[in-house]
């Protein structure tokens, strides 16, 4: 099974859980990525205090397809989750772990998963600034 976890979750994400999901005696490399809520955005006039994520009902199936496509013909295995709900600055919005026999595939697949999530995953976020200003950002934003 090349995708061991592909989940949309309201619960906080655990990178350790994702690493454990891809654990294998054949894996010589594990690459990880954690996307976190930051306190600023180039489009924001002020400080960002939260992001509110919402997902299309098919988002989990789309996440599975994204991970499978990124694996392609490599020997990589993937665990990936995306949060929904209100996240404060510093919280993880995305967690990815990719294991493979060699580092190149782990890095390449991990990067492709996050780039495809940004391009294709039907998840939207509402950015909340300190003054109460909000702005919606969709796929690719």
Image (cartoon, rainbow, N blue to C red):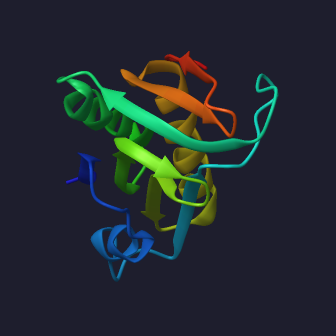
Relative to 41, residue 106 above or below: below
Nearest to the observer: residue 51 or residue 62: 51
Which residue appears farthest toward the bottom when viewing the image?
A: 25
53 horizontally vs 114: left or right:
left
Total numbered circles: 0
Position of residue 58 measured from the top left corner of the image (x, y, whole percent)? 19, 23
Side (left or right) of 109 relative to 18: right
Q: Residue furthest front?
A: 131
Residue 74 pos. (x, y %): 43, 47
Where does residue 50 sit, x and y in percent of width and height?
56, 44
Instruction: Give the x, y percent position of residue 128.
Output: 58, 33
**Horizontal side, residue 97 vs residue 48: left or right:** left
- Tell me if I can see residue 122 in this picture: yes
The residue that appears at 34% across and 42% down in the rendered structure is 85
**Quadrant housing the C terminus:** top right
- Taking the spot 35% from the left edge, 62% from the top edge, the residue there is 12
Please name whichever residue, 133 or 79, is drawn nearer the observer in this view of the structure: 133
Considering only vertical position in the picture, is 106 above or below 130? Answer: below
**Position of 84 relative to 124 (above/below):** below
Kindly tell me whether residue 73 is visible in this rendering.
Answer: no
Placement of 67 over or under 105, stated as above or below? above
Name the quadrant of the N terminus. Answer: bottom left
């Amino acid at each position: 099974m090349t995708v061991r976890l592909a989940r949309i979750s309201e619960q906080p994400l655990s990178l350790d859980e994702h690493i454990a999901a891809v654990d294998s005696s054949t894996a010589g490399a594990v690459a990880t990525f954690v996307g976190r809520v930051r306190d600023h955005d180039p489009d924001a006039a002020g400080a960002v205090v939260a992001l509110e994520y919402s997902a299309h009902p098919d988002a989990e199936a789309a996440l599975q397809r994204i991970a499978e496509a990124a694996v392609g013909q490599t020997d990589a295995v993937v665990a990936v989750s995306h949060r929904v709900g209100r996240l404060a600055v510093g919280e993880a919005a995305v967690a990815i772990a990719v294991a493979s026999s060699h580092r190149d595939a782990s890095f390449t697949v991990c990067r492709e998963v996050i780039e495809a999530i940004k391009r294709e995953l039907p998840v939207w976020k509402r950015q909340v600034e300190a003054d109460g200003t909000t702005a919606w950002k969709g796929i690719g934003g």
